[in-house]
Image (cartoon, rainbow, N blue to C red):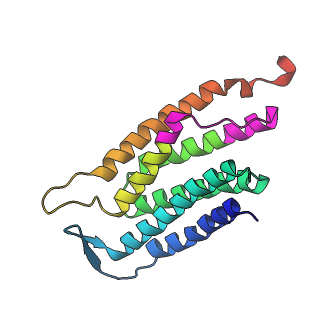
Amino acid sequence: MNLPNKLTVFRIILIPVFILLLAVPWNMGSVVLLGTGISTTYLIAAIVFIVASLTDLLDGRIARGQHLVTNFGKFADPLADKMLVMTAFIFLVELGKAPAWVVAIIVCRELAVTGLRLLIVEQNGTIMAAAWPGKIKTNTQMFAIIFLLLNNIGFSNWHIPFGEILLYICLFFTIYSGAEYFIKGKDAFKDASKE
């Protein structure tokens, strides 16, 4: 197993750690960070999420840069990403930090695009690469989750809802990039017998 695949497996292992941090009532109190009290549990969960997200960034770069792309990596890397992000969003809904309807749209888009990509690969063996709206969606997802977990760090009385702002930017690009995928991949729904 090469380094990118080890990083992917490590990211998958971090998911149950993330779940345990948010599912178990640890009662660790709060820490004072940048002038605001933040739940220690949420802070540790955010750090675990950041580490997991960084492994996603690293494994892809290493795999492409060193020509270490494997079938396991092609399967496990996107699966680990979806598992991590969907787990985080589900907990944010339970914790009252994200609206369920926004998360439902994000989850539905992810499932639909994943299905479309599989259909395209099955038909012609090519993988539909992510365009810039999809990359913006992914980045805003990651940062929205982090800021929402940290309860929108503020300074004394000055507060900017970075988490919510990023979440709605993410929602826009979720819908936009999803529509773009289906417009570009519309030929995947044509029956071969009718062509």
Image coords of residue 16 (percent x, y)? 57, 71
Most foreground residue, 96 or 114: 114
**What span is colored magenta in the figure?**
115-136
Please tell me which residue is depicted at 51% across the width and 34% down the height of the picture.
132
Most foreground residue, 21 or 90: 21
The secondary structure that most of the magenta stretch takes on is helix
Image quadrant where one finds the C terminus: top right
The vertical placement of 20 against 189, above or below, is below
Image coords of residue 158 (percent x, y)? 15, 56
Q: Is residue 116 visible?
A: yes
Please tell me which residue is depicted at 48% across the width and 42% down the height of the picture.
137
Q: Is residue 97 visible?
A: no
Q: How many marks?
A: 0
The vertical placement of 115 against 52, above or below, is above
Image coords of residue 170 (percent x, y)? 42, 43
Most foreground residue, 78 or 193: 78
Please tell me which residue is depicted at 47% across the width and 40% down the height of the picture.
136
The vertical placement of 88 against 104, above or below, is below
Picture quarter containing residue 120? top right
Most foreground residue, 143 or 19: 143
